[in-house]
Amino acid sequence: MKKLSFILTTLCLFFVSCSNDRIDNSDAKENDMQQLEKMYQEIVTLSKVNSETCTDSKDWDFTAIGAKACGGPEKFIVYSKKINTAEFLAKVKTYTDARVAFNVKWNIFSTCDIVSPPAGVGCVDGKPTLLRNTAF
């Protein structure tokens, strides 16, 4: 009888510790996601896309940002050419590298479709807007 209660106690402790690992992993993944979101919001703020009026599309450019698990960028982001573009693009690269690491660490899957680069940037109602290539 003592052996049976020892075995049951051991099994219970094993299952409790396994469920705690899943909770810890879930918390760690959520924390990683929050860090990525914080980095992304900082990039959006630096881009001036929401704070500067677009009157001349030549003052704006775009770059790929993020990384899909299958490869390639998640999307493209518009930024003002009036900012420190070297610093901005370095932050975009840091974010993209962090996204790649996140995808690998958490075994993330994604669609493998290719995000087509925009045709350019235009000013629509005072906002910089990515122009899509309509030839396809």
Image (cartoon, helix red, strand yellow):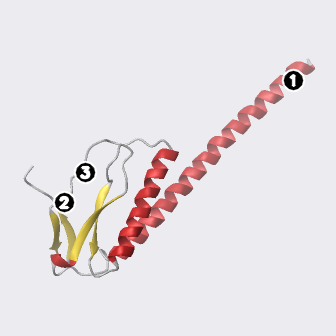
- Residue 126 vertical placement versus 92 (above, below): below
Residue drawn at x 15%, y 80% is 56
Task: Name the image quarter holding the N terminus.
Answer: top right
Q: In x, y percent, where is residue 82?
A: 28, 82
Which is more N-terminal, label 3 or label 1?
Answer: 1
Could you give the CA–CA distance between mark 3 and mark 2, rounded to whole angstroms?
A: 9 Å
**Amino acid at the residue labelled 2:** Pro
- Residue 8 vertical placement versus 16 (above, below): above
Q: In x, y percent, where is residue 129?
A: 20, 68
Furthest residue toward top: 1
Give the side of residue 7 with respect to residue 45, left or right.
right
Residue drawn at x 83%, y 23% is 7
How busy is the neighbourhood of tag 2: few (under 14 within 10 Å), some, or many (20 plus)? some
- Residue 115 shows which numbered tag? 3
Q: Where does label 1 land, which residue?
A: 5
Using the rendered view, name the quadrant where residue 10 is placed.
top right
Q: Where does label 2 land, which residue?
A: 118
Which of the two marks, 2 or 1, is nearer to us in this view? 2
Mark 1 residue element: helix
Closer to the camera in the image, 25 or 112: 112
Residue drawn at x 44%, y 63% is 94
Which is more N-terminal, label 1 or label 2?
Answer: 1
Furthest residue toward left: 135
Could you give the CA–CA distance between mark 1 and mark 3, rounded to whole angstroms?
A: 58 Å
How busy is the neighbourhood of tag 3: few (under 14 within 10 Å), some, or many (20 plus)? few
Mark 3 residue element: loop
Give the side of residue 23 with respect to residue 99, left or right.
right
